[in-house]
Amino acid sequence: MNRQIKIIAKRALINLLILLAAFTIQTCVFPLLPVFSAVPNLLLILTFSFGFIYGSKTGMLLGLVSGMLMDLFYTGPFGFYCLIFIYIGFFNGIFNRYYYNDYIQLPLILCTLNELFYNLYIYVLRFLLRGRLDIGYYFMNIVLPELVFSLIFTLFLYRVFLKANKKLDVIEDRRGTNVA
């Protein structure tokens, strides 16, 4: 039992470090690169990927932490980003039961749907309610570039997360302490 707690704690620490690295890169590094016209949403990729790989509970927990980081470092009401990231983690975790993790098509579809849902949420609650009705401009200049970059990064990052998860599972199986 004690060994299982240590393994869960190690996984949680690894996930937290990945999350902090993604947040740092998304907020501090990407905006400084002149090559990018938009910034890929690494926290969104991380939340839906881990929800899809590990299930709804992990997706929601990672979504909570991702949302809290966004809420702490960006203006607006506290909980604005938490809510959307928790929903994304939960709904993508549902697919964990029904689909294999190895195929890349579903994560790309999920990335597209999550980006559209996330940006629609932001548009409605941040712009539409304030009378800014130019959704065409918002879609062409913010949503579409972010969606393209997020899809490109999903191709790479999802496979990295999946391989790391499988490697951790193999290590746990060798020790005879697989928690899943």
Image (spheres, rainbow, N blue to C red):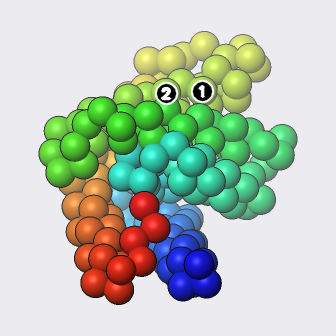
Give the image quarter of residue 125: top right
Name the residue at 74% across, 17% down. 129
Viewer-proximal residue, 127 or 160? Answer: 160
Q: In this figure, which residue is indicated by the disc labeled 2?
A: 117
> Where is the N terminus found, in terms of image quarters?
bottom right
Q: Secondary structure at mark 1?
A: helix
Viewer-proximal residue, 121 or 51? Answer: 51
Give the CA distance from mark 2 to mark 1. 6 Å
Vertical position of residue 109 compared to residue 137: above or below: below
Q: Which mark is residue 10?
A: none
Q: In this figure, which residue is indicated by the disc labeled 1?
A: 121
Residue 176 is situated, as x and y percent measured from the top left of the image, at 36, 80
Q: Residues within 10 Å of mark 2 (few under 14, many from 20)?
A: some
Give the image quarter of residue 133: top right
Q: Secondary structure at mark 2?
A: helix
Vertical position of residue 101 compared to residue 98: above or below: below
Q: Is residue 95 visible?
A: yes
Residue 61 is situated, as x and y percent measured from the top left of the image, at 62, 54
Viewer-proximal residue, 137 or 88? Answer: 88
Identity, as a three-letter code, of the amino acid under mark 1:
Tyr
Name the residue at 46% across, 67% down. 179
Q: Residues within 10 Å of mark 1 (few under 14, many from 20)?
A: some
Residue 144 is situated, as x and y percent measured from the top left of the image, at 35, 34
Query: What is the tally of numbered marks visible in this picture?
Result: 2
Identity, as a three-letter code, of the amino acid under mark 2:
Phe
Residue 54 is situated, as x and y percent measured from the top left of the image, at 42, 53
Dots 2, 1 in contact, CB < 8 A? yes
> Where is the C terminus found, in terms of image quarters?
bottom left
Q: Is residue 147 visible?
A: no
